[in-house]
Amino acid sequence: MVAHDPRKVALLTGANKGIGFETARQLGAMGMVVLVGARDPGRGERAAAMLRKEGIHARFVLLDVTKEETIKGAVDFVERQFRRLDVLVNNAGVLLPNAPSVGQGSAVRPPSDCTIESLRQTFETNFFGAFMVTKAFLPLLRRSEAGRIVNVSSMQASLQNKADYGRENGHTLFLAYCASKTALNVLTAVCANELRDTPIKINSICPGYVDTDLSSHMGTKSPAEAARIPVHYATLSADGPTGGFFDESGPIPW
């Protein structure tokens, strides 16, 4: 009989760099086994090795959220090695270079110029990917004494912020990205309702404007600072919230 690791097990998607990597580092420093989900084996293995050098129990897991076969493979791995999952952080996300906010030179294209290809590809990762991963790992999360799901969203998902038509807001030009993150928030809300009679908690979080590849390193917050927010919601106590949308200051308007 295989002896399964008694420590809490956390799986993070898109965890080979940025917020995902720093979240894995902080959860690992708390004593969790961290599974570094990444679609690139070389980058994923290097990220896990870096964490192991710090004394963290980290393992790379091949996981491309747009490919169902890798999701199934990751579920099989966790089932075989740990029998359960305690924390799932849906961190993988894209802001495609051909999104409507990017035009020729300094020109900014309006949302109506968004291509259907950009919209579909963005949703494939930011929404459908998170849905498929959550659905696939839910049976293992149900085996945890206190399963936690954290969906990494964005302030740009807030419909209340978007609905201020009289205010110039350049971020409304990120149609594909904003819409996909709003959909992710819907996933959070409906899943929380489904899981309301279980110990599992699921929340959306906004890490802020972070210095990562996604922001072209223009963000004002470091990945380590931003990671404190998903870490907090990944380690909520039994009386913590579920089905909410939060940043470091508290609830964000839907």
Image (cartoon, rainbow, N blue to C red):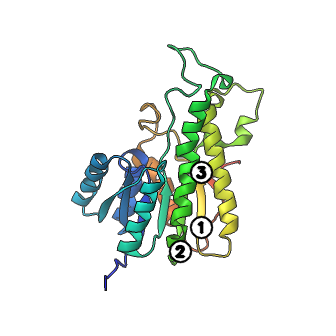
Residue 52 to residue 167: above or below: below
Residue 185 to residue 74: above or below: above
Q: Amino acid under label 3?
A: Ser
Residue 26 appearing in the image: yes
User: Circle 2 is placed at which residue position?
Assistant: 146
Q: CA distance from mark 3 to mark 2?
A: 24 Å
Q: Which mark is residue 190?
A: none
Q: Nearer the viewer, mark 3 or mark 2?
A: 2
| Residue 145 x %, y % | 51, 78
User: Circle 1 is placed at which residue position?
Assistant: 201
Going by the image, does 152 lie left or right of 212? right
Q: Amino acid under label 1?
A: Lys
For image coordinates 50% across by 32% down, the residue present is 96
For image coordinates 49% across by 57% down, the residue present is 89
Contact flag, marks 2 and 1 (Cβ < 8 Å): yes
Report helix, strand or loop for mark 2: loop
Which label's residue is closer to the chain start, 3 or 2? 2
| Residue 130 x %, y % | 54, 53
| Residue 177 x %, y % | 58, 37
* Image quarter of residue 116: top right
Report helix, strand or loop for mark 1: strand
User: Circle 3 is placed at which residue position?
Assistant: 249
Residue 153 appearing in the image: no
Report helix, strand or loop for mark 3: loop
Q: Amino acid under label 2?
A: Ala
